[in-house]
Amino acid sequence: MGSELQRRVAELVSAAKQRETESPVEWAVEVGKWVEAAPSTELAEVLVSQLCFQHNRPSLWKFLDIALSSGLLSPPHVLSILSSRVIPNRWSQPEAYRLYLELLRRYAFSFGPLSGDVSKEKIMESIDVVLELSQTYKVRVVELGHALVLFFFSVISSLIDSTLDDWGFKMTSRKRPRSDFGGADYSDMEIDSRESKNFKIKEHRERIRKMNSFLAIEVLAKLTESRKALVLLRLVHLNMPEIFNGLLKRLRFLEGRQLASSDLSSAVEPLARLSANIQRVSGFKYQLNKRKLIGMLLDSGSQKPVFHCNPGFGHSTCWVCFDIYMENAMDGKQLSIKSVVDILAEGIMTLQVFNQASWQETFLALWLSALRLVQRERDPLEGPIPHLESRLCVLLSIVPLAIANVLKDETKLNSSSIKGDTVSGNTENGYGHKMDGKSNTSRKQGLISSLQVLGNFSGLLCPPSSVLDPANIAATKAARFVRNSKTEKDTSGAGSGGDVCIKAGGDMRHLIVEACIARNLIDTSAYYWPSYVSASTMSPSDTSPIQKSPWSTFMEGEPLRDSLINSLITTPASSLEEIEKLYHTALNGSEEEKAAAAKILCGASLRSGWNIQEHVVHFVVKLLSPPVPTNYTGPRSHLTDHMSMLSALLFGASYIDTVHILSLHGKVPEVAASLIPLCEVFGSLKPTSNNKSSMGDESSIYMVFSLAFLFLLRLWKFYRPPLEQYITDRGGPVGGVLTLEYLLLLRNGHIAPAGDETNGSGDQLESSPVGPMCINSYPKLQAWYRQDRSCIASTLSSLSSGNPVHEVANKILSMIYWKITRVGAPPSNSSGPSSASISGSPADTGEDSCQRPMLPAWEVLEAIPFVLDAILTACAHGRLSSRDLTTGLRDLVEFLPASLAAIISYFSAEVTRGIWKPVPMNGIDWPSPAVILQSVESEIKEILDAVGVNVPSCTSGISTAMLPLPLAALVSLTITFKLEKSGEYVHTVAGLALENCASGCCWPSMPIVGCLWAQKVRRWHNFIVVSTSRSVFRQNKDAVAQLLRSCFSSFLGTPHASTSSLSGQSSVNGLLGFTIADVNARPSVAPGFLYLRSCRTIHVVQYVNDVIVGLVAEYAVKLVTRCARTDSPRLNSSQVSQCLAIAKTKEVASLGASLLCVTGGVQLVQELYRETIPNWLLSSKEERHGEANAVSRVMEGYAMAYLVILSGSIEWGIGDNLPSWTLSRRARVVGIHMDFLAGALEGNISLGCHPATWKAYVSCLVGLMVNFAPVWIREVKVETLGKLAGGLRGWHECELALSLLERGGASAVGSAAELVVNVLD
């Protein structure tokens, strides 16, 4: 057909030429009869071959024009062929080039109908082959839309290249992208075989050539003004940024050369238009219809902040995620396994994007949240929980380090932009987001501004009493610096003698500024800020001499003596050099110096050396794994040579606040990996002495092992009841439960970053082995680990006589029985020697029984479950008294403190199995809580009533308190411990395990246990009562729902109060409280605080999703009505009312997302996407909200979309610089949800929600994803994106559909282009 068509066309043209009568219209009619279907690719190729350049006559060009306008030919196809042939020969064929430019001006966007798969495929393949798109752009062109985008971009690039060549400009860049057809045929430029000898003709053609280059720029300027051109180029910008940046380079190069040449003055105006049009691509944003509510919702970032609309609002409500996350991080039962610095840095950038705030607003909100965190500790509950030191760590170390990461990220973005010479950079990865100019100022300038504004919040800046002296020292340092600079005195640093110390004037801002200066976030120019240095601080009348720092004495070489050691322990170091010297002393000093250096390192420098805390933490972890000396050949591990140092270090690192500080810095995996070799080595050694308790011997083998082992299990959280250790059907642990393997996996993932980390000393981390670790490399630990899992999973199997474990168990029983008989004669129900042995074997009662077994700790731990089974069975059958049982357990813990781990694990498993009968806590056999049980229950009821929770009493009518035998034994053991600081490593493990075990039993087990402890430690009464009240929420769904409702009402106000002030007492302080507890006699906590301390123990955590989703929907509907009634009826349609309603809806969703994430983390977010929201959309909610108007329905959908996107962003981030497993999980879960929406849009799923809610949810979800998380869209299947875009187009949301498709990656370019062709004018 092609050759026949070519012959006919050639005959037609030749015949017309001979007759000298050419009628292009008649040609078009005649040729139209020859083609099988229009548009015809064969006809296009034939006609262009005739034009280029056998019959290059005006009539044939006119015929081509008619064929294009009539639909006989496809304009993109014809223009592609012409581009490949005319542009390279533009010098020899200037007339053809000029006519080509005219056709391009007319038909560049006349894509014509794109129906018919065969025709589309032919046109696509021809355009791809002719322009060599696949080779040039290294992509596979499989859709006509994709080909059209690359065709248009190629034509623009080629014309700019041609103009550069025609004007004699050469780009020297090696990366200059250039199409093969973009240059000129220089041989034809010199010799034109077709050119007439006539000089006038030659001169005429020269003028055409010059005009053509200007015309090309004019045509490009005109074409790029089109909306279609903007969208097509934006598809290249978003999905092929390097290629687009090459176009920008050429434009800048052309502009620069044009300005330097006076001959090109006429091109100034069109070139400026062209450049402006291209530059507009990167900053283009689709303008949704703001007259529609959905368009206004998605454009709400351009409105004024809500506190500008209503003076009753404050900044804090927009950033509640910060407050909730920080307060949740203070939960001593939940140690963070990831650095809070990294989590907070990610959260800062995420919330800055979602709030569309300036960096000043963002950093100010962060500082205020951290200050509120510290202020809530002013009247704390006294108990074994993290206190002020951990909260100050967040304010003065974690937050500055997180900000440093944010500033570092900006530096990387800027450097990458400079290297790439691009304006696109990473603006579409989620973090380079620009919001109406708010982000134009640098992040560092935003930090400085936030610190300056922070001085206006004097109520939050008042330092706690324990921090008053450091605050005054910081203020004095600034005053001294300012005074010295004014008097031009060159003095040395603080503590160098002869200067002054001010007694008053310091506040928390002075400490914050010093923390920022220490990390080079700002410089000392901050000292000159207005009001930073007060006049009283500058007055010399208020001064007193400064004492010499003990650290100066230490650096001068003074030996570590008692007085100096005590001073160094209580005084934080001020420089990294001091910490480095201390570290080397701990490794290379004498035995006494090693131990002293370890104690000092874990002292004030770690807990309150905020300016260098991250370095102290680094060296503490590093010191846990002393390096192997060169050529070490000792018979035992080199770790034994550091036993005294390790003992002191483990003691110091085991304190509650210290452990929490280590976890805040993300060191849990590294610490666990360092502890494992210690446990393996010291647990395999025999003790050298058996004549005293291990708990009293700080440097014994048993003591070092116990410290390391209990520390390890504390990080691992092994004491969770087995009921909480089940795995979901999708493979994720519930409730944040850790395993030892997972900790090692995390540690192995940190190896590479740790090697790149610099700490000022130049040393690499020698902590733990350099390579990856696995539990199989530590056989002793692995054997115990397997035994422990086995004991939890099932009851113990009997041991045969003569088994080594059997023999060890008998020795331990003999030791316990000898201790019992030493205390007094065995009671009547005590067992004899034969009944205190395993399997009925007689235990020795001779001299050997008086000796403590000298066995490796691993052997003892292996035998302990069998010992516990024997004595618990004996007690249950009346052969051993409860008092003797407690005494035996106590003696066992004193012998080997690490045995507490086996006791807790065994008893917890037995309680869960429920095979032991309850025993009466009557004060005769077991301790009794009766004295205060009723009063404690009354206090619990008051706490619950205060937060809106109403649960029935369960102790009324109970004559005698009862507990399962294992739990009774465990609580009786723990109340025998002395509450000394040196025993904190035992108390923390026992206390947390006891609470978990008791709260897992039926009510009122927890109040009984709480009363027993409250009777022992009266100063902990309030803490114990509050802790006991938390157990109500473990299995009571109604209580959880009531508490969550109180959280919402305390933060937002009740949704049913139509006339109440929207500000009132509802705020972050209403949610979390001004302080943790009032100074009144009765304990009191805010609903949000109580929820944060209870949410991780909720059994059916998926239920929380349903409650939160219901509350968010309810508040969104009700708040619209409330906002419309505020202040004036006229506000119902005003911008203020709309602004207020949108802001409050965002607050509702933000609160819901924050509470959801802290409750169940990523598992609960996955459940939200996969189950909760789909079920919510499928179910009918008419009965819940009654007669809600259309606006309320739309706001309901918006609130739910905001909840979904924000919760996902909190857990998965909005960028692409994340671990691969996080990205794959995000893509999978988001993809499932988007598939569900696409199916519903196609009508495959029947929905139960209101149509307005459904439309608002889908539209707002897509809009929020486009605005805040565009990277997510590239992870969704193209077919799904196409279905969603089709649904949006059906709702006349074409702009939203385009913005969705254009961010779908290279595979979605074709679909986006086809939508452009079919929709845009």
Image (tube, rainbow, N blue to C red):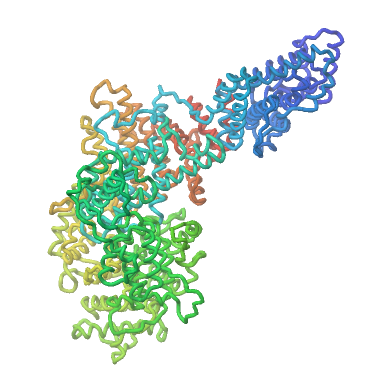
In the depicted structure, whether residue 129 falls above or below residue 801: above
Quarter of the rendering occupied by the C terminus:
top right
In the depicted structure, whether residue 614 falls above or below residue 532: below
Quadrant in which residue 760 is drawn: bottom left
Q: Position of residue 151 (x, y in %)?
A: 66, 29
Query: Is 620 placed left or right of 159 in the picture?
Result: left
Toward the viewer: 341 or 924?
Answer: 341
Quadrant in which residue 783 is drawn: bottom left
Looking at the image, can residue 1312 be seen?
Answer: yes
Residue found 35% across the figure and 76% down from its top: 591
In the depicted structure, whether residue 1050 falls above or below residue 881: above
Q: Position of residue 240 (x, y in %)?
A: 59, 36
Query: Is 111 placed left or right of 594 in the picture?
Result: right
Looking at the image, can residue 1039 be seen?
Answer: no
Labels in figure, total:
0
Query: Is 800 placed left or right of 883 in the picture?
Result: right
Q: Position of residue 85 (x, y in %)?
A: 75, 26
Residue found 47% across the figure and 74% down from its top: 629
